[in-house]
Amino acid sequence: MAREFSRLLSLHVFIVLWCLGTFVVSFAPQVPCYFIFGDSLVDSGNNNELVTKAKANYRPYGIDFPQGITGRFTNGQTMADIIGQFLGFREFIPPYATATDKQISTGVNYGSGSAGIREESGSHLGDRISLDRQLLHHKSTISRLSRSQRKTLKKCIYIVNIGSNDYINNYLLYDIYNTSQIYSTDQYAEVLIQQYSRQLRTLYRLGGRKVVVFGLTKIGCTPNEMNKFGTDGKPCVESINNAIKLFNDRLMPLVDELNNNNTDARFTFINLTSILSPLGDVPFPSTPCCHVREDWQCVPNSIPCMIRTLSIFYDGFHPSEISNIIIATRSYVGVLPMDASPYDISQLARL
Ligand SMILES: *[C@@H]1O[C@H](CO)[C@@H](O)[C@H](O)[C@H]1NC(C)=O
Ligand SMILES: *[C@@H]1O[C@H](CO)[C@@H](O)[C@H](O)[C@H]1NC(C)=O
Ligand SMILES: *[C@@H]1O[C@H](CO)[C@@H](O)[C@H](O)[C@H]1NC(C)=O
């Protein structure tokens, strides 16, 4: 498995270098702007000033990031950062919390650690910006744009990567949230999808036409959930992965439905199960790279593992930069037909 993983890595590192090479010679971004919605998988500092335990603005987060500590929940770049580079943006898209009027014309990052599709998800950790509130922030961004900038919104790329906290920091915390008493996993997937459907339609009404919707990863394979629930001799917590599959299996048809109902829109679905399948159900080193505290985030100022390109996870939940590179690369240019459908991001950008 270790050998397979390093083979996979070298292939991806090659593709990334090739794409970055293309990016260096291109003069302008492929689309006028790039907007990012989601949770800690994409947060670039929006939680720094919030009262919450879900913060990553301390060492050893950011140890491999050019600007150091920023609030990103990983050692280096997030998947949203890397996709931004592929799209040709020279600067990182600024977090909403600090974005200036000049910066917002090329896009804003609304992502917030511990946030979910549902308002209450993550609330036991403190404040967070739920997807509904991220959409309100987007509305306010649009009101700050000039008339000519507003006209370009239909050409921009929007990515949405959210839903993990509706499980990790809601449904799976039986003592704190009551969703698991109210809904079966099937019903819960359905109510999440109904709410997500409304939210994606709001994004459409706000001008989003090229929208990338990320499916969820196999949350039952994160170090935290494996430790908490046990795996019963299996590689991962199967009951959690089954619950996640019920969500993903509804999300892709939702994307198709949004495309059918709105003929001028291009929504696309990214299948992280497919992208991460070589690492899938084979036991893989699921030990976090950093030393984790009780809540499975990194211990402040601790020394992380040395060879970070060999760790899938940076802390107990979050992918390391190398995992983000794999995800971003294959969302940008699909390798298997299942990776991105109906479009990968490079196709979406050109449409
Ligand atoms: C579940 O908890 C929420 C608060 O998070 C509360 O408003 C609601 O009434 C509860 N529902 C049930 C059926 O207990
Ligand atoms: C698509 O349109 C049908 C028929 O009008 C409607 O019932 C359905 O809710 C719409 N779905 C979405 C996701 O917009
Ligand atoms: C994602 O890809 C996996 C592996 O190829 C496949 O089994 C699954 O059905 C796909 N999921 C969706 C929602 O298309």
Image (cartoon, helix red, strand yellow):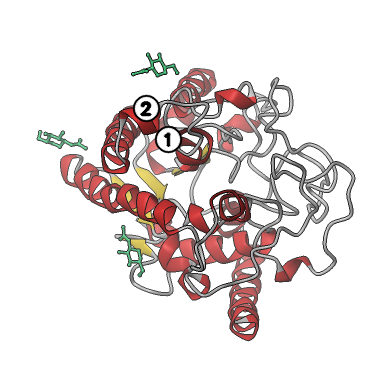
In this orientation, which residue lies closer to the viewer: 6 or 26? 6
Q: Is residue 174 left or right of residue 185?
A: right
Nearest to the eye among marks 2 and 1: give it. 2
Which image quarter holds the N terminus?
A: bottom right
Q: Earlier in the sequence, mark 2 or mark 1?
A: 1
Dot 2: within a 10 Å radius of its alpha carbon, few (fewer than 14), some, or many (20 or more) residues? some
Which residue position holds label 2? 206
Image quarter of the C terminus: bottom left
Q: Is residue 66 left or right of residue 90?
A: right
Whether the residue carrying mark 1 lies under 8 Å from ligand 2 is answered with no
- Which residue does the image show at 16% across and 40% down from the upper left? 261
167 to 3, vertically: above or below: above
Indicate the amino acid at tag 2: Leu
Mark 1, other Cα within 10 Å: few <14 / some 14–19 / many ≥20: many
Determine which of the numbered discs, if any, sits on residue 153 in the image. 1
Identify which residue is drawn at 62% across, 39% down: 43
- x and y percent of residue 70 in the render? 77, 39
